[in-house]
């Protein structure tokens, strides 16, 4: 998956799941808190939606505040995540 496709997925989660309709577009330099007004509770929700909707595993021990500084830093983190293994 390309970085552009991944940013579109994150944008969809933000606008549809987190109901952040003010976010019309995402740029990698945008700061999650200051520019997009995403607070700590929304960040936790975002992590859950990334796991559920993108089928990725987000290890709690790898979470670092620097990941959530900008859209670009979040994307870099998401690109490194492993897919969930679905059991039958």
Image (cartoon, helix red, strand yellow):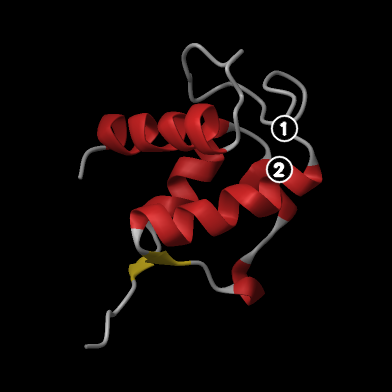
Residue 45 left/right relative to 16: right
Residue 56 left/right relative to 45: left
Label 1 and label 2: CA atoms lie apart by 6 Å
Residue at left offset 53%, top offset 32%: 14
**Picture coordinates of residue 10, whole percent (x, y):** 44, 37
Residue 66 left/right relative to 9: right
Task: Tell me: residue 6, above or below residue 27.
Answer: below
Query: Pointer 1 and pointer 2: residues touching (CB < 8 Å)?
Result: yes
**Picture coordinates of residue 60, whole percent (x, y):** 63, 73
Crowding around mark 1 (Cα neighbors within 10 Å: few <14, some 14 to 19, many 20+) is some
Residue at left offset 22%, top offset 38%: 2
* Quarter holding residue 70: top right
Residue at left offset 69%, top offset 54%: 44
Q: Quadrant of the N terminus?
A: top left
**Picture coordinates of residue 68, whole percent (x, y):** 66, 44
Residue assigned mark 2: 42
Q: Camera-side residue: 88 or 82?
A: 88
Q: What mark, if any, has residue 70 been given in the picture? A: none
Query: For the residue labelled by badge 1, is the local secondary structure a helix, a strand or a loop?
Result: loop
Crowding around mark 2 (Cα neighbors within 10 Å: few <14, some 14 to 19, many 20+) is some
**Picture coordinates of residue 8, whole percent (x, y):** 35, 29
Task: Tell me: residue 25, above or below residue 74.
Answer: above
Residue at left offset 60%, top offset 28%: 19
Q: What mark, if any, has residue 38 been given in the picture? A: 1
Furthest residue to the bottom?
A: 88
Instruction: Count numbered badges in the picture.
Output: 2
């Amino acid at each position: 998956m390309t970085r552009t496709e991944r940013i579109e997925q994150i944008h969809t989660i933000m606008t549809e799941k987190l109901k952040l309709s003010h976010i019309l577009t995402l740029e990698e330099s945008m700061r999650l808190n200051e520019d997009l007004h995403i607070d700590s509770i929304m960040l936790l929700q975002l992590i859950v939606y990334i796991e559920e909707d993108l089928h990725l595993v987000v290890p709690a021990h790898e979470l670092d505040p620097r990941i959530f500084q900008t859209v670009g830093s979040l994307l870099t983190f998401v690109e490194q995540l492993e897919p969930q293994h679905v059991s039958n």
